[in-house]
Amino acid sequence: MTQPPPVLENEFETEDIFVNMGPQHPSTHGVFRMVLTIDGELITDVTPYLGYMHRGAEKLCETMDYRQGIGYMDRTEYLANFNAELSYVMAVEQLAELEVPERATWIRMILCELNRLSSHFMFLGAFGTDVGVFGTAFVYGFKNREIIQDLFEEVTGDRLMFAYFRAGGLAWEVPDNFETRVREVLRDSREGLQELDGLMTQNEIFRARTEGVGVITAEDAIDWGTSGPTLRASGVPMDIRRDEPYLFYDQVDFDVITGDHGDVFDRFYGRIREASESIKIIEQCLERLEPGPIVPDRLPRMLRTPAGEVYTRTEAPRGEYGIYLVSKGGNRPHRLKIRSACLSNLQALRDMTIGGYVADAVVILGSLDIVLCEVDR
Amino acid sequence: MTTDESNGSAAESLDDTIWDVVDAALAGITADPERGAQDLIVFIPRGELMRGLSALKSSESLSFDYLRNLTAIDWEEEGIDVVYHLYSSTHRHNLTVKCHLDNDDLTLDTATTVWRAAGWLERETAEMFGVRFEGHPDPRPLLLPEDMDDTFPLRKDHPLAEIEVLQGEGIAYAEEAFE
């Protein structure tokens, strides 16, 4: 879509202009700042600035015991809290060699996929605003997200900061009507996805605004370390759920969604299709859910791990959420590194934006679906 | 190449890992394998690290084209380990590479020449641990303020500030405030 600037017959002396976007820009989804160097309407360079939300989450986790760290994970990835908690508790479980009961694993899977769904709804709504479908998409997206968030509140007692997973299992049993409620939510979500699909995917103006914009090739996407829907939109079928199955992902049937062009539209549409796959996964999980214990029989009150290290990675809605846990023995990590999916995705922003128009910068940034709390940690 | 005498016992337990392929790809480079809880860990000394990482990426049987993660671990008096988590998008296998640095010389060549993904991760490791990455194209701090170059928050000798330091002295706790 990008065309070279027209060549003037009489060359004027021109100067590049610097435009500061953020950190308080509504489309930066938090506090992200980028300085655009522009030549007319064309972007010639982008310099991102991060760190406005840096709270030292890793350092804090190194001073807390394993149980206290769980709550902190919610605060790094606040739109996909279950997925973040999961990486952390899985790391602790692997080091401590804890066996997770079957029922707890299925419930974890249901909640993580529901969280993917709610996170994608949030994206669809917010992305509509970025593109300029002001208001409508946002209301639809948030309405659907809220339905799922209500269910999470019923299960965990908190709307956002769940702290529901424990090393070994779950904090407590889900409510009696959990299955019926999940099915209700799935029914609503399916309708909601169709609405958003009709509202945006089939909208000519929306497509003109997103197709062919912010393209990144598969080689570049891999080299920059992008992951999740951003990477798969470029046609790389990498999905940790399938490639290195954790929980019971090897026992359910789902498709890995890839795009063809690596543009903004593919990153957007990939998420809609991925959300439908999540519904498919949850339905299969519900079939397999049976009564049983949700924590191991012998779970120590104060969890200690032997010395060692582990790097667990899970497929969070935005990509690979990894926890690198190094222990010297004892009840707290010696080093805890959070591998942020958004940080690596953001690195590729420069490649996607240069050569595009100023108006596209917001759309491209929006298509990465960043969570600044996770980037800055 | 590791000598069989020093790793005789370790090699036996590495049977089901990709160590023999890694060993072949790293011909002529000192590499110490260790079985991790999940992935194979290989220690490569600093002088040979960049050659080793490039070999791991370009080897056809390994093709580690994806840098998952890059960070460091502070072992206090014993120096700092820089850790690379590698993944191959074609073969779908993992490898952890570690490089040990002594406290009196925390410099290392940049891995941005191998994977561009290393760019921001190295900037973060540099500001948090004080490891200097030689030849980095953009060595500014990533998350911390630009003038905060004398202290390294993720080192173990860097304490967490007391709450009074952060919020100001004389801030009453809730119960006292309502009395």
Image (cartoon, coloured by chain):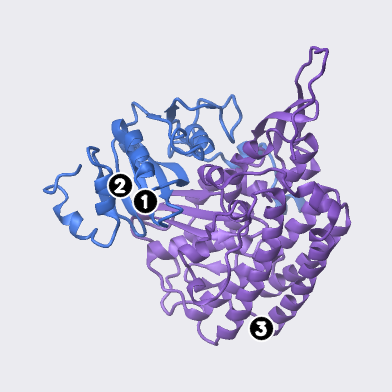
- The residue under the point 78% across, 34% down is A358
Q: How many marks?
A: 3
Q: Residues within 10 Å of mark 2 (few under 14, many from 20)?
A: many
Chain B, chosen colour in render:
blue
Q: Is mark 3 on a helix, strand or loop?
A: helix
Question: Which residue is most to the bottom?
Answer: A291
Question: Which residue is most to the front?
Answer: A9
Mark nearer the N terminus (1 vs 2): 2
Rendered location of residue A251, percent (x, y): 49, 77
Is residue A38 in view from this perspective?
yes
Left or right relative to A343: residue B40: left
Q: Type of residue at label 1?
A: Leu
Left or right relative to A232: residue A121: right
Give the Cα distance between marks 3 and 1. Answer: 40 Å
| Numbered mark located on residue A213 in the image | none
Q: Mark 3 points at which residue?
A: A179
Do residues under tags 1 and 2 come within 8 Å of each other at their CB atoms? yes
Q: Type of residue at label 2?
A: Val
- The residue under the point 88% across, 52% down is A134
Q: Type of residue at label 3?
A: Glu
Do residues under tags 2 and 3 come within 8 Å of each other at their CB atoms? no
Give the Cα distance between marks 1 and 2. Answer: 8 Å
Rendered location of residue A101, percent (x, y): 47, 78
Chain that the image shows in purple: A
Rendered location of residue B30, percent (x, y): 23, 39
Q: Mark 2 points at which residue?
A: B42
Nearer to us: label 2 or label 3 = 2
Quarter where residue A285 is shown: bottom right
Q: Name the residue under label 1.
A: B95
- The residue under the point 88% across, 55% down is A135
- The residue under the point 51% across, 26% down is B137
- Towards the viewer: A310 or A300: A310
